[in-house]
Image (cartoon, coloured by chain):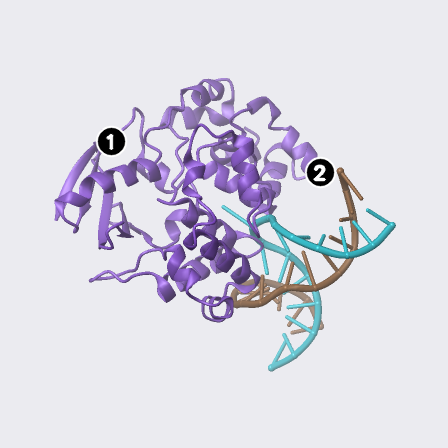
Chain colours: A purple, B brown, C cyan
Amino acid sequence: MHHAEIPCPAAFHFRDVVFSHGWVQLPPHAWDVDTETLARIERLPDGRVVRYSVRAEATPQRRLVLETDGGADTLPLLLQQVRWTLALDEDFREFYALCAAEPGLRGAAERGQGRILRSPTVWEDVVKTLFSVNTTWGQTIAMTRNLTALCGEPHSEAGRTFPTPAAVAALEPEELQRVCRVGYRAGPLSRLARDLAEGRLDLEALKDPALTTEEVESRLRALQGIGPYAAANVLMLLGRYDHLPVDSWFRKTVREGWFEGGAVSDRELVAAFDRFRPYRTLVYVFYDWAGARAGG
DNA sequence: GGTAGACCTGGACGC
DNA sequence: GCGTCCAGGTCTACC
């Protein structure tokens, strides 16, 4: 077992990042409640399949500890991956400045919140987002498990990698639908996998900060099955925080939090976030909605 | 530009 | 047991 240490940003809370949204429940992520450790099975570019885990040192969380059963030569790549998946290199000071004037956001600033757990590849985040659309969260988990079990690469001890585009592209949409129970998402999933595997599409390029958010959104919306909600969700995972993911959960949360549960149009719900540009999504994710509902 | 209806799936619900 | 509804939307046709 090899390990490396990663210095934490100021006011960093590992658990807050891991549980920033539901991704931790989707394989190949796994959370150990006893040791508070986040683990993943990962396929490296050279084909090796390794397991790695990340945990925070006890409070104050000044360092993360990365461990892997891969060779010592895998550590630089895995460190780079952890920095991306935990958004360790992002600067949230402007967001915290905005939080200071908003009672429902003061807790977020005090805890150093803003980081959202993401996948190593845009491909994985897009697939998981596609699986979260027009279904229940339980079925999203099942679809991800089924796809990973069907064509992820096995680790020697336990678990599988998230499938590569090539592995998914090798299967017919009918099989994806029948075995993974992904329903009508099989077509868009298969097409996405084939476009990536055959080099017609490059989703990793969307991580380029030189691209405008409008350009990234436009490329995401060009994907089959990715509409306004799904594109906003992926934009958030790419560190672009001004496109609100308007779905049924958003409507319920904001109506109950800011409009006393009344009937309000999407236009009005979104307009309520205008003053929080360009961090509207972070405000939605980290706002103290329970406090708002309680009248605070 | 807005709106209705179809779309996989499976759990919840009413009967 | 069975039918219906709908969930962390998207797409198309139609007006």
- Whole-percent x, y for residue A270 in the image: 63, 33
- Whole-percent x, y for residue A195 in the image: 47, 53
Q: Nearer the viewer, residue A173 or A94?
A: A173
Precedes in sequence: disc 2 or disc 1: 1
Labels 2 & 1 near each other (Cβ < 8 A): no
Question: Which quadrant holds residue A152?
Answer: bottom left
Amino acid tagged 2: Ser
Q: Mark 2 points at which residue?
A: A265
Local secondary structure at mark 2: loop
Q: Can residue A181 be seen in this view?
A: yes
In the rendered view, tell whether residue A5 sits above or below residue A167. above
Badge 2: chain ID: A
What residue do we see at 42% from left, 38% from top? A205
In the rendered view, tell whether residue A97 sits above or below residue C8. above
What residue do we see at 43% from left, 61% from top? A169
Checking the image for residue A27, the label placed there is: none
- Whole-percent x, y for residue A22 in the image: 43, 47
Amino acid tagged 1: Gln
Q: Nearer the viewer, residue A206 or A266?
A: A206
Q: Name the residue under label 1.
A: A61
